[in-house]
Amino acid sequence: MTDIFTRLKQDHDRHREMLERVADTNGDTEERRKSFEQLRIDVSAHANAEEQSLYAEMLSRPDLQDKGRHSVAEHKEADDYFEDLVDMDFSSSGWLTRFKTLKERLEHHMDEEENEIFAAARQDLSDERVAELADIFNERKPEEKQEVA
C-alpha cells in the first residue's frame, strides 16, 4: 500500500519530466501545446486532489496549518501562471520566459514539499491516516483531471 507522501512524490517526478519536455520545445508547435496542456491538467488535478487530502488534514491541525496554508498559496500561484501562459502567444519570447518562471516556482514548491512539508506532516500523522490520505488522493485525482480538462 502506497502512502500519501510516496504517491505525491511519484507525481512530482513525472511533473519534473513534463516540465523539461515543455522547456525543450520551440515556437507555437503542436508538441509545445500538447506537452503544456498535459502538464497543466496533471499539475492542476494533482494540486486540487492534494488540497482535498493532505492539505485538508494539515489545515485541520493547528501545528501544521501554516505549512498547509503556504503550500495552498503556492498552488494558487501556479494556477495564475498557467492561466497567463494559456492566454499568451506560444511562439513569443515572453511565453518562454514566463514558462521558465513557472518551472522554477514549481520545482521549488515540489522540493519544499518533499524536504519540509512532508516531513512535518509525517511526524504528526499515523501510518493509518497516511494510507487513508493516499486513498483519498487517488480517488480525487482522476475526477479533478476531468474537471480541469
Image: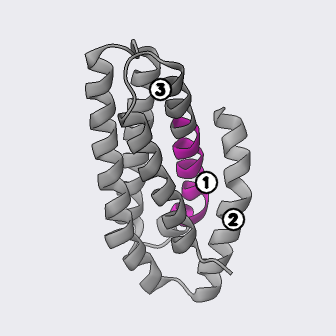
Magenta range is 40-56
Give the mark, 2 or 1, whose residue is nearer the N terminus: 1
Please, what is the three-letter code of the amino acid marked with disc 2?
Ile
Q: CA distance from mark 3 to mark 2?
A: 32 Å
Q: Residue at x 51, y 39 (%)?
A: 39
Please, what is the three-letter code of the amino acid marked with disc 1?
Ala
Percent across and percent down for residue 12 are: 47, 58
Asked whether the viewer can see residue 119, the reply is yes
Residue topped by disc 1: 49
Residue topped by disc 3: 32
Mark in the foreground, 3 or 2: 3
Residue topped by disc 2: 136
Above or below residue 137? Residue 133 is below
In the image, residue 55 lies in the stretch drawn in magenta: yes
**Mark 2–mark 1 CB contact (< 8 Å):** yes
Q: Residues within 10 Å of mark 3 (few under 14, many from 20)?
A: some
